[in-house]
Amino acid sequence: MSAAAETRAPAPRTPAPAPPTRRPGRRYRAGRWVVRNWRDKPLWMLLPATLALLLFGITPALLTIWLSLLNLTVSTLREWLEAPFYGVHNFIDAFTEPSSLGVTLGWSIFLSLSFSLLTTVITTPIGIAAALSVHNRFKARGLVRAVYLVPYIIPGFVTALTARVVFLNGSGLVDKILGGLGITNGQTYWLIGPHAYWAMQLTELWASWPFIYLMALAGLQAVPDEQLEASAIDGAGKYGRLRYVVMPQLSGVIKLGMLLATLYHFGNFTLAFVMFGSPPPAGAEVLPIATYYNAFDFFNFGLAAAIAVITMVILIIPGYVYLRSTRLTGRVY
């Protein structure tokens, strides 16, 4: 055998074919996609809020809807899940059968709508004017801002108790002032007569206008000084800058403030309940009071749940319209 043959490298072996790999199943691929996307995006941080919303928001709402379809009274309360099914009769009874005060659900809806809308319409210009008055620097500006917040930081039940004293018949501050001016004879009966609605309205106006003031003041901080300076250089006066520069940029904040204020006024239970007690006068039986009155005075829980469902539907409509409008314009405030 020659030396060349001895030093020749051995022929390489052909590697054995690898066993076929199994393609991951559809469930595995879907799970891997979910893990990868949730790892990249902090969506898992929304889980506590989602669970809280489900537990304290959606579940009670669904339970209320179910109770509104039952004939749930004090006699069937012990086995309320097995109460007789009543269908839409609770809703029909709410609109057709008046309460002991002669108030139907339609009248309560009208009272709530007029009360909330009128309060918002009156407090909005007051709040904007107050925000404009303390926007620029001057001496004691911080003190004035603090004084503006006094009606808002007082608890609602304290405001209602104070209003109950102020509107006392004959001896209250309002009757004394009106009687001294010769407008009334001092016997107006604000808390039990037909003027109860206006007593509640005046109290809500005094207590709630600082909310719009806070919203407008926050919006004023976001107006760029460069735009105000440029408009002043172009010859715009104070009114022109307010109308063409400031107010257009405040419109979104003001709309949001008006929506939130209206929803709050619509569902304000504390003021009417503490101010007038139970049963309330016919002019103050707004929807929250009607719900409470039917549930805990007449123990007609099915009817009270039906009124609560109608209240939820009414409150959802303006919120949906606002969110829809902001989505269409591409601007969210």
Image: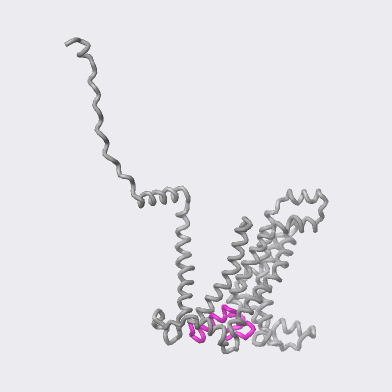
Helix, strand or loop: magenta stretch: helix
Q: Is residue 161 left or right of residue 177?
A: left
284 over 1 or under it: above or below: below
* Residue found at the very far left of the displayed protein: 1
Q: Nearer the viewer, residue 133 or 290?
A: 290
Residue drawn at (20%, 13%) of the image:
5
Residue 144 location, quadrant: bottom right
Q: Quadrant of the C terminus?
A: bottom right
Q: How is the image coloured?
A: one colour
Q: Nearer the viewer, residue 259 or 292?
A: 259
Q: Is residue 277 magenta?
A: yes
Highlighted range, magenta: 272-301
Q: Position of residue 203 (x, y in %)?
A: 67, 76
Q: Nearer the viewer, residue 130 or 151?
A: 130
Residue drawn at (67%, 86%) of the image:
194
21 over 219 or under it: above or below: above
Q: Nearer the viewer, residue 326 or 47?
A: 326
Residue 15 location, quadrant: top left
Q: Is residue 13 left or right of residue 170?
A: left
Residue 295 seen in the current view: no
Q: Position of residue 296 (x, y in %)?
A: 50, 83
Q: Is residue 189 magenta?
A: no
Residue drawn at (51%, 87%) of the image:
298
- How many numbered marks have been drawn onto this rendered protein structure? 0
7 over 124 or under it: above or below: above
Q: Position of residue 311 (x, y in %)?
A: 56, 75
* Residue found at the very far top of the displayed protein: 2
Residue 142 seen in the current view: yes
Q: Quadrant of the N terminus?
A: top left
Q: Position of residue 285 (x, y in %)?
A: 60, 82
